[in-house]
Each structure stands twice: as C-alpha cells, then as structure tokens.
Amino acid sequence: MTKAVVIIPTYNEKENIANIIDAVFQLNQGYHVLIIDDNSPDGTARIVKDKQTDADGKLHILERKGKLGLGTAYIAGFKWSLEHGYDYIFEMDADFSHNPEDLPRLLEACEEEGADLAIGSRYVSGVNVVNWPIGRVLMSYFASKYVRFVTGLNIADTTAGFKCYSAKVLRAIDFSEIHFKGYAFQIEMKFTAWKLGFQLTEVPIVFTDRTKGTSKMSGGIFNEAVWGVLSMKVRSWFKKPKRYDA
C-alpha cells in the first residue's frame, strides 16, 4: 500500500488547523499528516496534539523553537518523511487556499501517470485564483512569467506551493544546497528537481485565498523571489546540481 504524508507548516493557524486536518482524513485515502509548527503563540501545536489522540497514529507534529522560515520547515518535514519511509510527500498550506480534495489528483499524476513531481497549478489553464485583489494576482502571475524567462523552467506556476513529490526526488536533492528560506524556496526546489532530470507536471487547481487567520506574504518575500531567482540562475552556470543519492 502506498504511504503518503501531507506536510503542513504552521504559524498561528489555530482558526484553520483542526479543520484542515479533518478535511485530509475525511478523504479516506490513508494519508498521514505532518504538522511543522514554528512555536505558534496562539496554541496551534496544542490543538494538533489534542487531535492526535483520535488519529490512529496518522497525525504527527514537529515543533520548532521559533519562526525559522518556510523552506527550513519543509526541509525538516522532508527529512522526517524520508526517515519514516513515505513513498509520496505533499506540501500544502493550512489555510484552505489549497483544497484537500485535490490531493488525490496530485498523487494520481505521480503514481499512475509517471510524474516525479506534480504541481497544483493556478495558471496552467488560465488564471484560477479566487478572492485575491487584482494587484496580487498580477504580481503572482507575472512573477511566474519572470521565473520562467530567467530559468528556462517550463512551468506556468513556478511559485506554486501545493505539490506532490515522489520520495526519489527528495532523496536525490542535497538539502544543504537549497539556499532560500522564504517563498523563493518553492522556485528553487522545482528548478533543482528539473535540473536533476526529474519529470515535472502541472495539475490545474483553483486557489482560494484564506478566509481565516493572517497571510504571511510580505514585500521581503517578493524581493527574495525576484533577486533570488537571478542569483540561483547564475549559481547554476558554475555549479550544476548532482544527485545526492547517487
């Protein structure tokens, strides 16, 4: 039986966390959930721990000492998932901007259609974003265009954070060579997987902005993505990624 885990990083998500966990388990697909909590002062971790009692060993939590960045949260989750023998590892937000009902479609793209990395894409079939102001939609859309132009990555939604990895992709990546901690981390992981020769595919989704809790997006995050992509591309000219598990 396929072992799959959904990694959900959290910081102050008490309004969403119980519901998002329930939504994953209600799919009845056997998915496990791993919460990576960065010492949320609102008690997010306590809610998760309370729910572990009735989760039949399918709900896990890693607690970190502070707000250490999205990229390091996911890398901690990747390492934990590989150590525990999962075949497929998902990235998903806690705030329902990613619909848990799309998880089986991402898994199918990998398990049945042969992709190594399936990306839940907002832009592969038009612009499928709900409740964002038009300025943010345009910023996100053209940021992906920019990344595609600079890197040559043939992905419409290069900044997407809803993904399903085959474990072999994560085993092949040297996480010490992943430089970004913010949202540019999402770009760097796709770029690295592509440079290593893995097959990436996009699965169309509808992205719905959060209705509860507070967005973590900031100008600094956007600047990292803009300037970080240039530095990442330049680094790739001088140092090509090598398969870590080879």
Image (cartoon, helix red, strand yellow):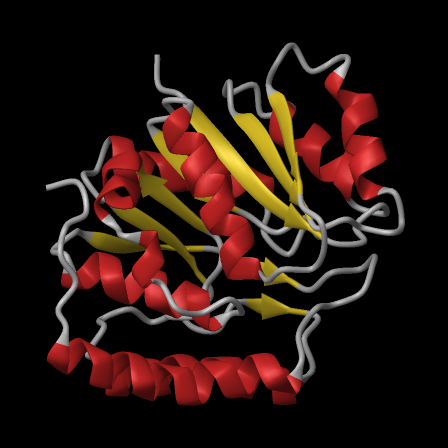
Quadrant of image for the C terminus: top left
Quadrant of image for the N terminus: top left
Q: What residue is drawn where x is 14% and y is 50%?
A: 243
- Residue 137 appears left or right of 112: right
Q: What residue is drawn where x is 30% and y is 35%?
A: 167
Q: What residue is drawn where x is 71% and y is 49%?
A: 65
* Residue 164 location (% of width, % of height): 39, 43
Q: Nearer the viewer, residue 174 or 216?
A: 174
Q: What residue is drawn where x is 25% and y is 44%?
A: 169
Seen as rendered, the residue at the extreme right is: 42
Residue 123 visible somewhere in the drawing:
no
* Residue 199 location (% of width, % of height): 17, 52
Which corner quadrant of the image does residue 54 belong to?
top right
Residue 174 visible somewhere in the drawing:
yes
* Residue 47 location (% of width, % of height): 84, 33
* Residue 50 location (% of width, % of height): 83, 23
Q: Quick check: 162 above or below 83?
A: below
Q: Quick check: 123 above or below 10?
A: below
Q: Quick check: 83 above or below 156?
A: above
